[in-house]
Every structure is written in C-alpha cells, then in structure tokens.
Image (cartoon, grey):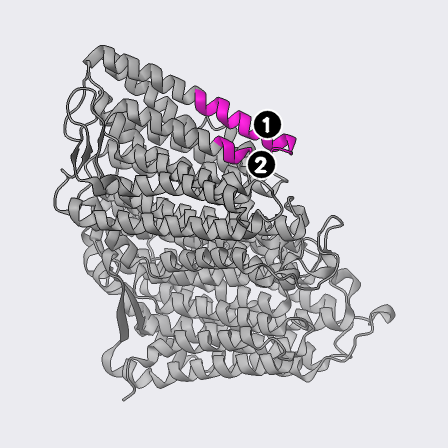
Amino acid sequence: MAGNVSVIAPLGILIAGGFVIYLLARLLNLDNRVEAVLTVLVLLATLVTTWMLIPSWFGSTTAFFGVLGDGGVIFQPNVLGIFIFLISLILGGLVSLYSAKSLSRDSRYLVYYPLILLSLAGLLGMFMTRDLFNLFLLTELTTITVSALVGFRYHQDRAIRAGFKYLIMSSLGTMIMLFGIYLVYRGSGALGLQMEIPIGTDSFSRIGAGCFLVGFSLKAGVVPLHTWVPEVYSQAPSSVSALMAGVISKSMLFIIPGVCLRLGITREELGIFLMVSACLNMLLGVIRALNQRELRRFLSYSSIAQTGYLMFTLGVGIYYSYTPAFSTGLFLFLGEAVMNGLVFLSAGVYEYHLDIRDVQALSGVSRKMPAQAFCFSVGLAGLAGIPLLAGFTGKWLVFSATIAVNDRFAWIGLAIFLISTVIGLAGYLPVLAFQYRPAENLASDSAVGDFSRVHVSNWMAIPVGALTLMVFLLGVYPGPWMGIIESLIKWLAI
Amino acid sequence: MISSLWLLGVAALPLVAVVVLLIWRKATKLQAGVLALVSEGLTLLIVFLLLPRLRQDGAVFYSFAWIQNLSINFSLELNWLSLVFLVTEMAVTLAAMVYSLGENTGEKSSNYYYALLLLFSLGMSGTTLAEDVFVFYIFWELMLLASVLLILIWGHGEERGKVSLKYFIVTHLGSLIVLVGLITLYVNVGSSSLSVLMEQAGSLPLQMQRTLTALFVIGFSVKMAIFPLHIWLPDAHTVAPTPVTIILAAAMLSMGTYGILRFPFSLFSMEALQPFSLWMMITGLISEVYGALMAFAEKDVKRIIAYSSVSQMGYILFGLGSLTEVGMQGAVMHVVYHAIVKGLLFMVVGIIIQATQERDIQKLGGLGKALPAVCLAAAVGALGISGMPPLGIFNSEWMIFSGGFETGFPAILTIGTLLGSIFTVIYALRFFGAIFLGDQRPDKLPKKASLALILPTVAVAVLLLLGGILPGPLLSWVVRGVQGVVGGL
C-alpha cells in the first residue's frame, strides 16, 4: 500500500457507515428516524473528510492511495469527482432526512439507508478509481444498490418490475462495459486510467471506448437507451427518484469524457455524439412529457430533457475545446440536482399526505398545502427556466457558451434547445397551474375534498424548503457558486 | 437635488408593497387597492422628482454589482426615452387600479390580485429603466409572468387556462428570440451594459448587426402583436379581466416598441438597419389593415378593441420602419396616445359588459341615454382612435405619415397606410353607433355604473382631449428621447 490514506477516508466511512448502521438497526431495532439521523451523521462525516481532501489536491494532482505496479489498485481524487460527490452528499443527506417520514409506512427501512450509503460510495469510487476494471466494479456497486432501492417496495408489482427492469438494463450496460474492458486490454495490454496518458488509439481500444460510451449512456438515460427512466423514476420511492434524477444518473455523463478520450475516441467524435444525442433527449423528453397523466412519469421525461441540456453543454465544451462550457455543465449539474431533487421530493409529499399520483388530481392542492404547492411551483418554474431561479441562470450560461463558439452545429443545437424550452413550458405550466385551480373548477378526481390544511411533516418540509431556497439562491445570487466552479475548473483536465 | 439612489425606489417601493400585500391576507379589496394605489402613486411621484436631475444631467443612473463572475450589474437608467414609456405605463396602471375598485374583479384574494398588478407594473417599469441586458430580460419576463397569472386566476370563462397558456408560450417564444439576441450582444461585445453596447455594438460585423436586428425586430414584434405574430392577443385581451386588459393593451404592447428603439435602433448603424426599413413598413401596413378589418368583422365588443390594437401597432411599426426622425417621433407619440385611447375604450367596454352582462355588439344598442357620461367618453375614444383632430392620435398619425413620405420609398406605401386608416374610422363608428345609438333594447337595461368606473373613464377622456390640444410637453420629451436613438444612427 502506498500513498495517503486520507484519500480513501470518505469511501471507507460510507461503506463502514452502511454496515454499522445496518448492524445497529438489526441489533437494537432502531426506529426509522434514528436510522435516518445516523445516516445523515455518516454523510456529514464523509462531507468533512472529503472537504479535508481539498488542500491535498488543490496544489497538486498527485495525491493517491493504493497498490502501485501491474494489477495495482489506485484511487486518486480529482476536482470533478469531488465537486459532483459533494453535491451528491448534500442531496443524499436531504433525501435521508426526508425518508425519516416518507418511509414511516414501510417496514424495510433497515436496508434502505445502508443501500443509500453504498450507492454513494460506488459513485465516489467511480470518480476516484484510476483503472477500468475497478471502474467496472464500482459501477456495478452503484447499479446493484440502486436496483435494490428502486424495487424497495417489493409488495408492489410495478415497483418490482421497475427494479427488475433497471437491473436488467443496467446489467446490460455493465456487460457491454466488461466487453469493452476486454477489448481495451487486448488492444493495449493495460487498464490503467492515468489522467495524463492515453491508453491507446488502436481500433480495439476505440471499440472498447465505444462500449463504455454505450454503457454509461444507458445508465445516464441517453435516448434511445432511456426506456428504463420513466418506469424507474415513477415507481421507486420518491426519495430514491430524487437521488437518481438529481445526481446518480447525470453524474455518469461526467465519467464519459475522462474514459473515452483516453481510449482513442477523438474530441470531435465524442462532441458530435453528445450534441446529437442531447438534441434527441431534449425533444423526446419535452414532447413525451406533454401527454403524461402520472405526475412522476411527467417529471421523469422532464429529467430526460434536462439530461439533454447537460449533454449538449458538455458536447459543446468537448467538440470546440471551450472551457467555459465545462463550467456551465457543472453549474447545470448543480442546478438540475437541486431542481430535480425538489420536484421529486415534492411529488413524494403529495403521494404521502394526499395519495396524489396523477397530474389532474393536483387540482386545488394549494388550499391544503400552500407552502408545499409554492415549493413545487418554484421547482417547476426553475426547470422551465423562469428568471431569478436556478434554471434561468443555467439557460443564460448555456446560451452564452453556445453563442460564443459561433458554429453551425452549435446554432442548430441552440435552436433545438429553444424549441424544447418552449414545448417544455407547455408541460410545466399546466402542472403548476393545476395546484392553484379555483374551488369552483376543481376536477372530479381532485384529492381536495375539503379545504382543511394538511400539516406537512418537518422531516419532509425541511429538505423541500432547503432545496427551494437553493433554487432561489442559484437564480438570484449565482456569483459565489460560479466562483467555486471556476476555481475548480482550472484544475479540471479532460 | 434628489439623489440617483431614488431611482432604486422605483423598483423597491412596489416590491415592498407586494410583500406587505402577500402577508396581509385579510386585506379587503378596498384596503389592498388603496395600498397598491398609494405605492404606484408614490413611485410615479419619485419619477417626477427625478425630472430636475434628468434635465440637468441628461440621464439618471444607478448601479451596483450583482453577478461579478459574469460582469453583470444591477443598473438602472432614466433617460428621456424611458421617461415617456415609464410615465405612460405607470399612469395606465394607476387608472386600471382605480377602475379595479369599481369592477367586480379581484373580489376574492384581493391582496394577491393587487400584488400581481404591482408586479406587472414593476416588470414594465424595470424593463424601461434597465441599463443592463440581464436586468432588462429579468423584468421583461416578470411582466409576462405577472400578466399570465392575472389572466389565469382572474380571467373570464372556462378557456382561461388554455388562453393564458397560449399567451405565455407565444410571447415567451418571442422573448427567447430576444434573449438569443441579448446574449449574442453580451458575448460579442463582452459587456451587458447598454451604455457600453451603445458605444461598441455599432462596430460589430455588419452581417451580425443585421442578424441581431432581425432577431430583435421579430422578438419584439411578438409583444407588439404585429400580424402574423398577433395570435395571442385577441384571446388574451378578451379573457383577461378588464383592468388587466387595459394594462395589456395600453401599456404592455408598447414595451415591444421600446425594445425596438432601445436595442437595434439605439445600438446598430443605419447601414445595418436600412434593409429592414421597407419590410417593417409593409408589415406595419398589413397589420394596420388586417387589424381594422378584423375589428370590423368581430361581434364581441372586447375583441373589437383587441383587434384594434393589432391595427394601431401597425401604425407604430410603420413609423419606426421609416427610420426617419419624424417617423420615430410619431411612433413614440402614437404609443402614448394609443395608451390613452385604448385605456379609455376598454374602460368603456368594461362598463358596458358589467352594466348589461352582454358582449355581443349586435345585442346592444341605445345605451347613450342610460349611460350619458360613458357615451360621451366613448365618443371621444371612437373619434380619437379614428384620428380626428384635435384628439391626440391625429398628431401622431400626421408625424408617422410625414415620416413615410420622407423615406424615399414609393409614396404609394404611405398613401396606402393613410387610406387604410379609413377602415379604422369605419370600425370605430360602428362600435360607437351599435352600442350607444338607436333604440334601447328592453332586455338589456343597464345597471348603474359605479363612480369608481365612471371617474377614471371620464378623466382619461379629458386627458385624450388635452393631449391632443396641448401636445407640446409630450412632444418635447419625445423629441429628446428619440434624439438619443437617432443620434446613434
């Protein structure tokens, strides 16, 4: 073993924390809320240790931990991974707090929190590992734990089906990646993923890179490999959907350049792939969202479109070697994590308190839950790109980056971006407005039988409120966040 | 002399009132209305208090750093051009707020209703004062959002959801086109400040200036409801509660005019704008005639006046397209006069609908005897919109036509526009005659209109008369405002 052990401290805390919480819960028969609080404490400890890593790598990129030499296992933090992981930790903490109430009617919470911790450990490991085989293993760790979380409510057929679908689709992705590993090893005889050194540019490596591209695209929900997204996001517990739509799926996009560009795929090829796929995601997402009756399926398609916006920005950055596009991509990731987290958690509040799952049934809910309706509206308006909310700042930055490169591909992409924005509005606005429908126009299937207020549990209200505040902060005062991203981007080497 | 910090008050004061209204849930309609009126009135007073400063310095400027990473500042500027639009918009909002007190709109949730009216007004005043393109767009969208919510929540009929959605999507599409133009400017010049853009945008490549001009003219024409981009207007104006319709028609449409003057006309060279001149004039002519014919064909009294707006915006685009000083001055004068006359006509229509519960012009008639004051005001409005001297629109149309003749394009174009105004006379006289003349229908005996409705209506009619007879003060503001634009050409 060599290197600095603090590098893997966050990973160790997450994995150990998961097992300890499970054991404590089994032995002491812990209450759901206690387990949630313990999970938040583990995430806080992980946050602190991750934060403490910053001085060690801010000045140099050589900090690592692992076994050197052939077949060695190396973990090396990088700025991109740390940034994405910090956001994931914060959203994970909020989701855990929220679950303290939202899971109170489920009996299987014993395994829920450990699975959350393990899925985040897999995610962190994916960004820290420096070889393809461990990347494969850690991707599997994330996939399997998330599959279990998706099928968490195993007494519901649709949940089981969704979990199974995700497992099959994701496993297909990882199988393709495994085949890619074989091809890369055959072509180059190495699996190390050093930042500075391309592994190979031979045709085996290039095909292997293609396999990784397909595998990660599947996990990110890139069209046409997106078919699992609506089913999974609508059937998983809303807290899991929030985590998946907010960070886990979209973070896969940031692994693609680091892997593919080192395996012989050119910037032009990858950039074009991302931009074209992005356009498909944007259009399919917003068009399919229009005719969805189920609230979380609507949000799922919206999330597919949001993935498209992120891919488009990364595509512009890679194709044109335009660094500000990466800053924009990270800002978008942050904004989408917050907004998707907010809308999925809000949908969960409606499900939990009013048993509302359909868009039509939202009629008049603002009378029962005015604050909750406001928060959900902020999330939807943010996703629609309304000024002074996170989505608008992201939109402004995407426009700026695209216009700055001033090329026909970028302009075509921007036109599609605009069209999808307008179509998206036709989806977001009615959902938003349904909540405020006047009493005399309430739909017959409205859940609002009387207008008595429903108290939203603080366990759910606090995470939702915090995310709402974040949506405002990112829109009204985005400067500090952009400052952090810009300082990080200086160290980013894609 | 008053500090430029007071300029911030124009944005901050309505916001404070909005917060109070949002908290004050138990406010009655009268309480909420009076609070909103006081806030709007004080804001207008601040604008007038800034006038000496404006006369001295030529502009009043206030700024603070906002998003430093993007070099975006929260900058406001009051100049002569923005003054004309600002005062028009605020006066219209004030009148609409008084009118709201007498109308049966916003009876429920009055605090929210007046808060949204204030935000609507703030969106327009912020748009006119913005000195930074980012700030401009924020206020531009605030204006849209507030108006959409007002129609969605307090609009008439089952269709209000669909209508507000259509209004939002169509106008937002125009806004996005504008946004692309704004960001292209920002990226290529490297600044979002309008004063910097005014200095440097003229030196951008000619092709880029022309592309940007096309984007801005199309984007702002959506807001102006120029044919064929007017599709949102008739439904939105019809479904919206009358006070909101008054603000939409009398004030918000003019924001498109302001946008064209503030961006392509202020920023780019004459060489870049020249190719658009003829097209703008032709589109203006088509819009003028189309709107007038549709107004003539319509039966719904609100839709008649709504289509009249499409027609009147055609005159304005024609004046702008002439690219002459007098044409542009006429266009800006027309904005003000149109605001007055359109506010007046919608007030009249609102009173008629409230008094008779009838919107079909064929089922109305003979109301002149029952509502003499309203009849007199409607007569002033109908004659005003027909361009009858000495009412204001005569002055502005005269200037617009003069601008048209100065262009060097075939005179037939301007003559066509002049002749097109005959259609305006026809629908205006039909509107007045069918409602107020003839025999009164026994089944449509009107209820007595409240003083809160009659007073602002009569006041606006008097203002239209005064504005026409004494155009001097307005003209001096407009001349100075347009000079700032033409000076850059």
Quarter the N terminus of chain B occupies: bottom left
Q: Residue furthest bottom?
A: B1
Q: Quadrant of residue A433?
A: bottom right
The secondary structure type at the circle numbered 1 is helix
Give the residue pinned by disc 1. Answer: A161
Q: Position of residue A18 (x, y in %)?
A: 41, 40
Q: At x 21% / y 53%, what residue is drawn?
A: B189
Amino acid at the residue labelled 2: Gln
Write the residue at 46% across / 36% down.
A304
- Magenta span main SS: helix
To which chain does the residue with label 1 belong?
A
Q: Are there few (<14), some (14-19), or many (20+) residues within 10 Å of tag 2?
A: many
Chain under label 2? A
Badges 2 and 1: C-beta atoms under 8 Å apart?
yes
The part of the chain drawn in magenta is A147-171
Does residue B271 show up magenta in the picture? Answer: no
